[in-house]
Amino acid sequence: MPPSPDITQWPALTLRGLTLSPPLLIAPMAGFTHSAFRRLLAEFGGYGALFTEMLAAKPLLVEHFASSPFVRRRPEEGAVIYQLLAPESDRLPEIVARLRQVEPAGLDLNCGCPAPDARLVGGGAHLCRDAERLRRVLSTLRAEFAGPFTVKIRLGFRADAGWEERFLANLRLYEECGVDAVTLHPRFAEERLKRPVLWKRWAWAAAHTRLPVIANGDITGPETLAAHPDAFRGVAGIMMGRQAIVQPWRCAYWNQPAWRPADPAAVWDRLRAYIEDDFSPAKAFLRLRDFTFWYARNFRFGHTLHAAAQHAPDLPTLRTRALAFLQTAPAWDKQPSFSGL
Ligand SMILES: Cc1cc2nc3c(=O)[nH]c(=O)nc-3n(C[C@H](O)[C@H](O)[C@H](O)COP(=O)(O)O)c2cc1C
C-alpha cells in the first residue's frame, strides 16, 4: 500500500528522542526561515519541526545569538533544527558547544547547496564531492552532538557517469558516521531548482538505506502525494519549502488545500511586525520585500502587489501599498505557482 496522502495519519518519526508528529518539516530557506518567519509559522502550527536557514559554521563562534535574527529561537517556535554549512571539521567542537546555548532540537549538515557562498568555502554540495573531508565533518558533528543529527542532500553534483554509485557510497557514509536521517531533494546540485524532481528517487534511496528518508522537493500538499503514490513508498517524512513561504498556513491545513485566511492583510502585517522586532529597518525592508514577492503568488492579480513592492522605496511605503492591496479582499489563486521562485 502506498502511504496515505494525509500526513497526519503517518506514523510519528522519532530521532534520538525527538518525536516529529506529524513527520512534516519546514525546509531551511536562506533569507526566509529566520526566527520572525518561524514565529508566524508557529502561530499556524501543523509541522513536526522547523529548520533555520543554513548557518555558516565559523561565524557562529562570535555571533551574538540572542540578537541574531537567524540563530535566536523563541520557545513558541517548537522544535527548531539548526542547519550548518560546515566545510571543515577543525572548529566544529567549539561551534557545537556554543550552539548548545540555543538548545537546538537537532543539527543538520547542508550537503546539497550549490550556491556561490557554499562553493567559495567548499561546503554544501561541494563537500559531498570530497569523501574524506565529508567523513571528517560528519564524524566530528556526531561525536560532539548527542541529539538528532541529519543531512540534507541532493542526488549528486551532476548526472554524469557513476553518480548512482557515488550517491549510494555517500549513503553508506552517513550510516557509518551515525547520521539519524537524510532529507533527499532529488535534483542534481547543478540544476538548482530547475526541472521537476526525480520522483522515483525517494523510494529508491529508502530501499538502499536503513536510515529514515525525508522527501523534499515540489511537494505542495496531499495532492502531490496522491498524484505520485509510488514515489513515497518507504519514505518516513515530508519536508516542504517554497509552498510554506507562499502559504505559511499550509501545514496546519494540510487536508484542506483550499483553506485561506479570512484576513490576508493581517497575516502579512503580523510578519511585518515580527521582522521589525528582529532586523534593522534597512534589513527588515529587504526581508519583507522578498516575502511579499512570494506572498503575492496567492492572488489572481498578485502581479500588482509584486510590482508595488518592487518599487517601494522604504518599509513604510511598502506597508501602505501591501495593505492597500491585501485589505481589498483580493481574489485568491487556486494553486499558486512556484515558477521563478
Ligand atoms: C530561497 C531559498 C533558499 C534556500 N535556502 C536553503 C538553505 O539555506 N539550506 C538548504 O539546505 N536548502 C535551501 N533551499 C532549498 C530548500 O530547502 C528546498 O530543498 C527546495 O526549495 C526544494 O523544496 P520545495 O520544492 O519544497 O521548495 C532554499 C530554497 C530556496 C527557494
Image: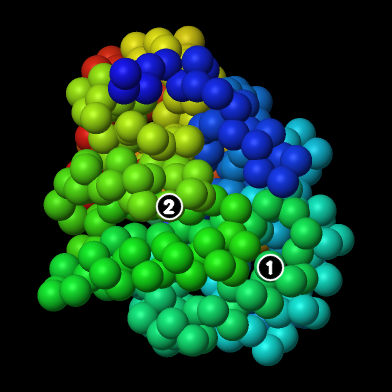
Q: What is the three-letter code of the residue carrying label 1?
A: Arg
Whether residue 245 sits left or right of residue 79 in the image: it is: left
Residue lying at 59% horizontally and 69% vertically, measured from the top left: 177
Whether residue 295 sits left or right of residue 68 in the image: it is: left
Could you tell me residue 116's position as x and y percent?
36, 78
Marking on residue 306: none
Q: Earlier in the sequence, mark 2 or mark 1?
A: 1
Could you tell me residue 283's position as x and y percent?
57, 61
Could you tell me residue 20's position as x and y percent?
63, 33
The residue that mark 1 highlights is 142
The residue that mark 2 highlights is 209
Q: How many marks?
A: 2
Of 116 and 261, which appears nearest the observer?
Answer: 116
- Please name which of the two marks, 2 or 1, marks the residue nearer to the observer: 2
Q: Is residue 48 above or below residue 311?
A: above
Of 225 and 53, which appears nearest the observer?
Answer: 225
Q: What is the three-letter code of the residue carrying label 2?
A: Thr
Whether residue 125 sits left or right of residue 266 in the image: it is: left
10 Å crowding of disc 2: few (<14), some (14-19), many (20+): some
Element under disc 2: loop
Could you tell me residue 144's position as x and y percent?
77, 71
Examine the rendering and report whether any part of residue 192 can be seen: no
Q: Is residue 313 above or below residue 140?
A: above
Element under disc 1: helix
Q: CA distance from mark 2 to mark 1?
A: 18 Å
Residue lying at 64% horizontally and 75% vertically, measured from the top left: 139
Whether residue 151 sits left or right of residue 157 in the image: it is: right
